[in-house]
Amino acid sequence: MNSAQITIQIIVALVAVACAIPGTFLVLRKMSLISDAISHSILLGIVIGFFIVGDTSSPLLIVLAAFAGIVTVFLVEFIQKTGLVKEDTAIGLVFPALFSIGVILIAKNANDVHLDIDSVMVGDLSLAPFDPLLINCTEGIADSCINLGPKAIWVIGTILVITLVLLFAFFKELKVSTFDAGLAAALGFSPVIMHYGLMTVSSITIVGAFDAVGPILVVALMIAPAATAYLFTKDLKKMLVLACFFGVFSAISGYWLAHLLDASISGSMTTVLAILFLLVYEPIITSIVIGLATTTSVIFYQYYQQLLTETGFAQFALSEKISRVFAEFVLLDYVTIMLVGGVCAVLLIYILPKRGVIYGYYKVRQQKTEIMLLVFLLHIRNHTEESERHVKHLNEHINWQRLRSDSVVELALKNNMITVDNDIISLTEKGEEFTEKAIDYIITNKDTEIEEMKDDFFLFRG
Amino acid sequence: MRTITLGTAILGAICGMLGSFAVLRKQSLLGDAISHAALPGIAIAFLIMGAKDTNILLIGALISGLIGTFWIKGITTKTHLKSDTALGLTLSLFFGFGMLLLTFIQKQPNANQAGLDTYLFGQAATLLEKDVWLMAIVAGICLIILLVFWKEFKILLFDADYTKTLGFNTRFIDILITTFIVITIVLGLQTVGVILMSAMLLAPAAAARQWTNSLGIMVILAAIFGAFSGVVGTGISASQSNLPTGPVIVLVAASIVLISFIFSPSRGLLFRQIRFMKNRNSIKMQKTLAFMYGIAKNHENIAHPHAIKILNGFQGFSKRSLQELVDLNYVEINGQQWSMTQKGYNTAENLYDQQVKDTHE
């Protein structure tokens, strides 16, 4: 690892943390897509700033870009308040319009401007370590500057420090206004100030990170770690810490993935984020897919290296190369890949009982039985006449198969809910009481009613 | 030039038609998410087939767009994450992965990848006659499907639960309409690009929504608006050099939305403001009348004159409201004095009764 690599990793880690903090609040406030809107419309701010100053490195650009972000938020709010369209439509109308103006401005002046949409839209980190912040420069004398290290670290570091200070200072207010806007307003925290404060911080962060990773990947860095953390925990503090952790983890491992594939850093960071999210969201399938993909690529790489020694292979087009390499695969390789996939699947189904497929199937069946038992008990309770309570009658009345009704009756007997006398079923006291409660719950549909019943429910499963 | 204009017009029309459904289903930003989610599909199709054949790339985009859509659905139904987060996740993660693949392709020797970038920003100039034919065919199929399933689409749109109880297969209808939205988005990528595609889908529909409350008229209007912005946008961008088509089309569509927001007769901001002011004036007038009634009923003769001065400082009184009362023949003015007429007295009496009745109800 040379110093440039370390610098890049520091930058991406800082960007990840700086994005994850406002991102968490955006996700919780159901405003994730505002970050998408801001990240696009700051292009207009940058372009206008560039026309005013004529220099891409001026701090005015950052100010104007952040301002454009806030204008976007304001416009979205305004359109939304008119009530003519829904909020998401308002977002979808505002940012493409602002972005279009930016693109047109660039295109009209493309000849004499050193500003290229591609470079603005993609973002490049690999040159960041070689763009140092120089101060105390004396005009005309070379090397008179004091080199303070890469500029990107200073920019994003400052933003991060400000974000952290604001977070610690206003944590309580943010928390209240996020989860209960009405209470926050009643307690005297202006919702407008909280909203626009958060939006300003997000806007500035997006602008700061924009240079490094490009606009769409900023959105990924803001939303994905927070969303992944949200699947893990419902505690705000834990969620913030986890989001930062996921951000930094994906940033660093994304950097090395990019190094390995010789591809864009921001793209591979997002890919790692996607894998992380999928691992949490759909652990089994994702692990199997990753297992398969890794094994395939390891085998692929070996054959690829072999083929590279042959003459002429390096000149082939990409798709031909791929088909050539796959042609080299023998049956054993496919068997290995399948085996790895199978092992992954089997392991995970047992390792993750709560989310595993087998457990899920089992749980659904249990719930079905519970519902059936409930229907059965209610039916018995509703009929006093003996003919309706005959064991055989159940088959036709509730439309159950014979086997199923047998198992339900057996289950009810086990739990002492019913007694069977000459094939006539009657409820026991316990059964009466339980059915009573169940009806209460069905009628009121209140959670408090079911709390007491939960213990009873576990009984049947026995 | 004619090909391009025709292409953008057809594209605008389909976008408008299907966009209406997206907007009414509160899936406005689905277009944004899917257009981004199509990128990895394009890159993978290129990687596998190694050719820049538009149709193959479009099929790749379609598949990855559909995967993105189902991902969004899955996340919102299976977890507690909200739809905005699901959209944002799909949008950014798919796009990031696509970026990774694109940069990977660019690093390969002999990778003739020039032109893949056009999918980012769109280039209407690359539209060929066969692309336009493809669009026309898709538009035709769309139209037929829309007409055949019109009733189902409509009922699903406004009352999904009811549709289910009627025995319609809501899942099928849902997938059908979403698939067509994805197809439209994928078709539009080449013309207006990833980022602006969402506006193409949204803007005509949002504008059409302002003019009507009927779904049929809205769909037709949206199609017209879409086609119009396509034609005008292409025309403007062709009239000058260095003017990219996609952004111009979007700006034209955005202007239509702005005009609709302001000037639409029933919902527009302008007429709403006018109605608001009318209502305010009439309330002012009624308040003044009620106040006068309060004074006049203490006198035996209701026409007993009073000084206008005593009305000063009463909220709701203005020269204008007094003038209106005179015009309606409720009040007579004699120099600096006013007096109530019988007609005004009766009206005010009923006005008060009406108020009492309202508050009691």
Image (cartoon, helix red, strand yellow):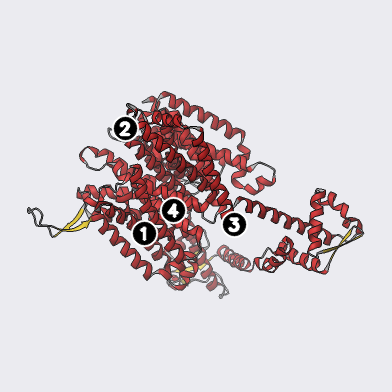
Locate residue B178 relative to residue A137 in the image: left or right. right
Q: Quadrant of residue B102?
A: top left
Q: Is residue A176 above or below residue B163?
A: below
Residue at 20%, 47% in the rendered image:
A54
**Front disc: 4 or 2:** 2
**Front disc: 3 or 4:** 3
How far, Cα to Cα, is label 3 from label 4? Answer: 23 Å
Q: Nearer the viewer, residue B321 or B3?
A: B3
How far, Cα to Cα, is label 4 from label 1? Answer: 12 Å
Locate residue A165 relative to residue A391 in the image: left or right. left
Quadrant in which the C terminus of chain A appears: bottom right
Q: Can you name the residue that lies furthest to the top here?
A: B129
Residue under circle 1? A17
Point out residue B18 in the picture as x, y percentages from the top left corner: 51, 38
Label for residue B106? none
Mark 2, secondary structure of its residue: loop
Lower position in the chain sequence, tag 4 or tag 1: 1
What residue type is disc 2 on?
Answer: Pro
Residues at marks 3 and 2 on the same chain = no
Q: Which of B341 and B319 is in front in this view?
A: B319
Residue under circle 3? A354
What residue type is disc 4 on?
Answer: Ala
Residue under circle 2? B109
Mark 4, secondary structure of its residue: helix
Chain letter for mark 1: A
